[in-house]
Image: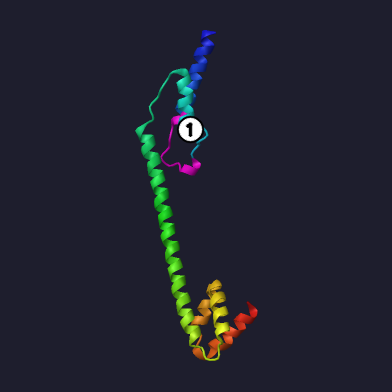
Amino acid sequence: MAQETEREAADQDAEMESNNVVQDDVGLDEMDVSTTPSMLSKRRRKSGEYEPISADCIISAAKLIGDGIREAGKDLSRSIGSEMVIQEKVQELDIILGEIDGLTEEERDIALSKIPDHPAQMLVFGSLPPHRKLAWVRRFLSSH
């Protein structure tokens, strides 16, 4: 009976040690969080044993979180930059559409709302010589 209890205690210690191992190259998405420190501490409280959390473990987790935050910040900056470019192009498009003789105000407004949804078409439109833009806009509006 005493040997069984000792074996169970040894198995629990081995399990706790394996759950506390952290590898530096493991991302947060790859970490096994099924046994969280709060669950371990509850288990420890029952048995009366306490084991401090390693500072290296906390530092590694903080570095992983920091890397994730930095990457998200870069993505956000790129997205905001893209939005600014699109807004500038739409403003330019409005000016160019206003300069096309024969284009009604209604056609201009509709084109201004539809052309930005088609970035490739916006580039084509911008590269056309002025005398071809009226016909191009009308063809675009009839097909979109």
Q: Of residues 23 and 77, which is closer to you in this image? A: 77
Query: Where residue 47 sits: x, y (%)?
Result: 47, 18
Query: Where residue 30 sits: x, y (%)?
Result: 50, 41
Question: Which residue appears farthest toward the right when viewing the image?
Answer: 143
Q: Is residue 131 left or right of residue 23?
A: right
For the C terminus, give its image quadrant: bottom right
Report if residue 134 lies within the magenta region: no
**Rendering colour mode:** rainbow
Q: Badge 1 local density, few (<14 within 10 Å), some, or many (20+)? A: few
Task: State the residue at coordinates (40%, 24%).
Answer: 51
On screen, 14 above or below 82?
A: above
Query: Where residue 24 sits: x, y (%)?
Result: 41, 40
For the N terminus, give its image quadrant: top right
Q: How many marks?
A: 1
Q: Of residues 130 and 56, which is closer to you in this image? A: 130
Task: State the residue at coordinates (40%, 48%).
Answer: 67
Q: Which residues are magenta?
A: 18-30
Query: Where residue 86 sits: x, y (%)?
Result: 47, 71
Question: Which residue appears farthest toward the front when viewing the image?
Answer: 105
Quarter residue 75 falls in: bottom left
The three-letter code of the residue at mark 1 reads Thr
On screen, 31 above or below 71?
A: above
Q: Which residue is mark 1?
A: 36
Q: Secondary structure at mark 1?
A: loop
On screen, 77 above or below 101?
A: above
On screen, 77 above or below 140?
A: above
